[in-house]
Amino acid sequence: MFWDEKNECLSRDEMTAIQEKSLKQTVKYACEKVPFYKQFLDEKGVRAEEIKTLEDISLLPFTTKADLRDNYPYGLCAVPQSDIVRLHASSGTTGKPTSVFNTKRDLEDWVDCMARNCYMAGVRRDDVCQIAFRYTLFTGAFGHHYGAEKIGAMVIPTSSGQTERQIMMMQDFGTTVFHSTPSYAVTIAEKMSEMGVDRDSLSLRLSIHGAEPMTEEMRDEIEEKLGTLAIGDYGLTELGGPGVSIECPEKAGYHINEDYFYPEIIDPETLQPLPDGETGELVFTTLQKEALPIIRYRTRDITTLTRDRCACGRTLIRHGAIKGRSDDMLIIGGVNFFPSQLESVMLGFEETTSHYEIHLGKRGRLDSVSVKVETRPDFWANVSGDKIAELTLKMEKKVQDLLGFRMDVQIVEPQTIPRSEGKAKRVIDDR
């Protein structure tokens, strides 16, 4: 049941002792090896020696993605280039990538975290794991690949794309675990339906999904269409990639590898710490990194923390599903909302699919927002203008009840919205 039972089931006092020792070492190490952090702490009037307990972490400054970009490429490295054995970078943004580095020990720690996570999700030695994350500078594919291999599972590194070939590999080699973004899992399921492949003819039993949020409604769709237990995975390139946290089959939150990553929740406006259970921004401090120690990194991800023992027996702190990103929050007419909230509405109707696009525009001087959503093929095949109008009104009312303002809903036919082989593009800004 456990990959590393000792560290996954520590008492709170035992974990705190490990974290406090590692925190003191990390802060001292960062100040000695990274001029950016020494200057940062000097400006705040904080000395590394003052950090003695976990409560003292509030004395330390926050690190942001802008700090990583401003110190590109090697400015935040704590080791000479000759000690770096691997570079990874953020996926798909414009301009300079957010780059992270690994020493040999960093990679060993990462593989251990990923083995712990994959095992927690349900991967075992006799599994066949198909990795459909894209193999690029992005960390996702490599993390899942090495974690599954560490357990002893067979790995098929298909990368993303070539969807029909993905399904052929599942059929021919008996894939039991599928690793991908949740949106690509839906694309796989759609292609299976087109090809006449019954989910029960495959050996799939588990799917692990990361790189983008997975709502409960999308999880339900994946589990129904693929016949798997769908587990959510969480990580950030800035912290090394996946391996930060993952769900267990209880689906009661994401277990954080807190002996490697110390979590906090802060108010994104005041930057003050929030107690367990309150919703705020997730912040992490790395506790074991050699090449790129990170102090109080603002993830911008909105969630909660809980410390009670999970039904699976683990005592690791859990965070809830990511509700959205503070920098991805949309504000229309003074109302704040996240794209994932709309996804929950879309998937609440049996006539529609999980494929949707939010379009931001202008009406005069005011911002406006509308959403396109695809219908299911069986609904569209027998649809009439009256049925579309009725469904549109129902969806607009549901959105208004949820968000407090009216949003135009446009019902479109199947295959209208572009499919994604990686992260789905949900928001189109036409302003």
Image (cartoon, rainbow, N blue to C red):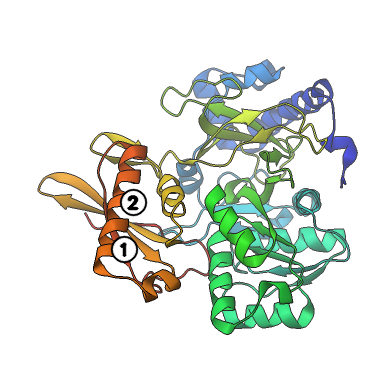
Separation (CA) of disc 2 from disc 1:
10 Å
The residue tagged 2 is: 395
> In front: 144, or 349?
349
Q: Residue at left 55%, top 66%?
A: 186
Q: Locate residue 85, reporting x and y percent.
A: 72, 59
Q: Amino acid at mark 2?
A: Met
Quadrant in the picture for residue 258: top right
Identify the element where label 2 is drawn.
helix
In the drawing, does residue 255 fall left or right of residue 418?
Answer: right
Circles 2 and 1 in contact, beta carbons < 8 Å: yes
The residue tagged 1 is: 411
Q: Amino acid at mark 1?
A: Ile
Q: Residue at left 38%, top 41%?
A: 329
Is residue 323 placed above or below 184 in the rendered structure?
above
Visible in this render: residue 389?
yes
Quadrant in the picture for residue 10: top right
Visible in this render: residue 371?
no
Pointer 2: residues within 10 angstroms few (<14), some, or many (20+)? many
> In front: 344, or 79?
344
Is residue 15 placed above or below 202 in the rendered structure?
above
